[in-house]
Image (tube, helix red, strand yellow):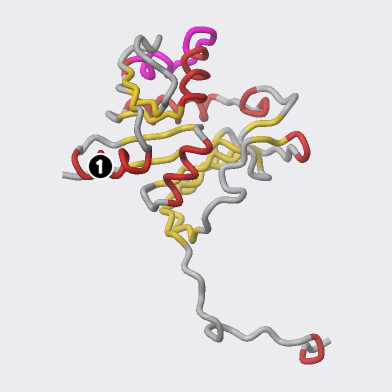
Amino acid sequence: MSSTLTVDFFCSLDGYGSARGWPGYWGKEGPELIDDRVRTFAQDQVLVFGATTFREFRKFVVAFDEPYYDRLNELPKIVFSSTLEPPLGWRNSTVLNEDAVTAIDRLKRTTDVPMRSHGSISLNRALLAAGLVDRLEVMMFPAITGRAGEASLFQNGAEFDLELVESTVLDGRTQKLVYVPHLHRAVPEGVGPRLRSTDERKI
């Protein structure tokens, strides 16, 4: 028995998950993107959240109307938090007050229902660094947010080699890239191509 963990990350071209002063989805939501979300959440899975993202999603599903929000309400959810206590205000939700890496490692070995985490930057950075993420789904929007950018999943995190297993363009502009992440192993000194000095380069 084993489960898989998928991490979703929505970002601008420069790798930020949000930006001050920009609208949701960087103002580039389209019907194909929404259809992709509907198909994604139609699958049986457990949703995994950190406390901050859980609170945000809990508000979204009440304040906004997206075709897949009813499905988010139906799916089982776990949230890692030392401060949240039942009732959690979002049905089918369970709070776990324990180390997320340890808990996800245990759940992957003892359950067979896939897990998916969206948002939750610090949580997902830790799960990636621990080698627990089986699929990394990056939804890259055609925007460069520069100094306004916030919430970078990869900055100051672990290093990875990525195996591309799926590539799709949605609404003619947004790229969905699905990777299998492999923790990068440093190449021993003296192995690999030798960089030539300036004097050796041909002009």
- Amino acid under disc 1: Arg
Does any portion of residue 134 appear in the rendered image? no
**Residue 146 falls in image quadrant:** top right
- State which quadrant residue 98 falls in: top left
Which stretch did the figure color magenta? Answer: 61-73
Measuring 37% from the left and 37% from the top, which residue is drawn there? 99
Task: Name the element at disc 1.
Answer: helix
Residue ID at (46%, 32%):
118
Query: Looking at the image, which is closer to me, 102 or 173?
Result: 102
Please give the name of the residue rendered at 53% of the width and 58% of the height, measured from the top-left corner. Answer: 159
Pointer 1 local density, CA inside 10 Å: few below 14, some 14–19, many at least 20: few
Q: Residue at x 45, y 51 (%)?
A: 129
- Residue sitting farthest toward the right: 203
**Prevailing secondary structure of the magenta residues:** helix
Indicate whether 50 appears above or below 131.
above
Q: Position of residue 28 (x, y in %)?
A: 64, 28
Q: Is residue 111 left or right of residue 53?
A: left
Q: Where is mark 1, residue-wise?
A: 106
How many numbered discs, if any? 1
- Residue 111 visible somewhere in the drawing: yes
- Where is residue 110 shown, x and y percent of the image? 18, 40
Instruction: Tell me if residue 56 is in the magenta stretch.
Output: no
Is 34 left, or right, of 109 in this rendering? right
